[in-house]
Image: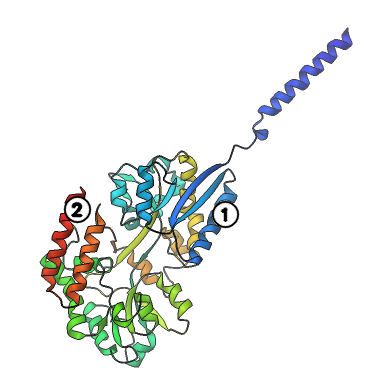
Amino acid sequence: MKKSWWQFLGLVIVIAIAIISLRSPNTVPKSTPVTVKLSGWGGSPVEQRLLKQVLQDFEKQHPNIQVKYEVISDQYMDVIKTRLVGEAAPDVFYLDALEAPFLMSQNVLEPLDSYITPEFDTADFAPTLLKSFQYQNHIYGFPKDYSTLALFYNKKAFANVGLNNPPTTWSELRAYSQQLTGKLNKYGFGEIPELARQAYKIQAFGGQVTDNNGYAKFASDSALKGLQLVLDQYQKDKSSAQKSDVGTNSGSEMFGQGKVAMVIEGNWAIPYLKETFPQLEFATAELPSINAKKNTMVFTVAYVMNKRSLNKTAAWELISYLTGKAGMQKWTGTGFALPTRKSIAQNLGYDKDELRSPLVAGVTYATPWQVGKYPAPIVNNFDNQFVSALLGQQPLKQAMLTAENEANKQIKAME
């Protein structure tokens, strides 16, 4: 009888130990992996390889989160907007600052404020960049990288005409351009007459691209004063050229091919020029001041979260890694992109880099490439009419009034 009792007691103890073991935190089976869908537009093969590497690093550190990365190669924003309406949008996706105001106003993005921890250190982001993704006191995205514009100049062409330093004012740039035209290069300066490259000139004399209600306002006298600088150099001096004038597809290409001695471009031009034109000797400088004011443009893209995502915690883990200090250092460590975090720019030495420091310096005073909720009418009408004025087909004021009126008519129809 005693033996049976002890056998029974022993069996109870064994079962109890087994139950306790099953409940132990150390033996809890891993949860089912969560899949986060990330969408972006297609970039260069270098960019795609780099992003995949960073995503693999993320998955190693987050074994319960798998990232399904999708490239939308054509009509990116149209596809994203369609999917947002149809509830089929990715959990996380790229959002250009230009398109951000509209989506932030449509209640389709998840505000990220409640996810932020002190360790994430939002103060580390350049304020100009972060502001582009803020709306009604909420943060809707964190910028993954950026570029300002800098002056690229041909060192051999400068030396050939006795120029030792880059121009620091626009009047100097115009004088340099005249000296350089017809020498080693056909033209002194390569002009890109798109609003994305002209908005800071509109602002140089107190002009605006849009008013407080988001309507086009680039036909004011102060706006025209900045734009007239472009026409004078192109029409009167004949020392600048558009890419179509010299049979090229971009500012970087006409500079690399030696068609122009100076051009204004972004960080993307550096790896392109080094790889495609390895013999080219060039340098960079901050943009020349206009009306005694320093300015440039800044372009940036953020990771944002779909408000209807079913995996918001995991989606935030991905965003916070990609835009956190460790992930950003990996993403921008090759120089392919510039880090939006000030600490990473310093860690990588970009603030002292011979070619990139002018780009980094510009972010503190740059004009963000953002023109309200309805950018397409503003951009398209400006670009079409400004080129017409540049070619002498109509007076500048008439062209800008036409562009402004047509843009505002289209915006009213979209509201």
Q: Which residue is mark 1?
A: 56
User: Label 1 to label 2, Cα distance in Å?
Assistant: 43 Å
Residue shown at 35% from the left, 54% from the top: 77
Mark carried by residue 411:
2
Viewer can see residue 292: no
Mark carried by residue 64:
none
Residue shown at 34% from the left, 84% from the top: 259
SS type, badge 1: helix
Residue at the far top: name it.
1
Considering only vertical position in the picture, is 404 above or below 274? above
Considering only vertical position in the picture, is 173 above or below 47? below
SS type, badge 2: helix
Residue shown at 35% from the left, 74% from the top: 250
The amino acid marked with disc number 2 is: Ile
* Image quadrant where residue 300 sits: bottom left
Q: Nearer the viewer, residue 17 or 177?
A: 177
In the rendering, at what x and y percent does residue 399 appear?
A: 14, 69
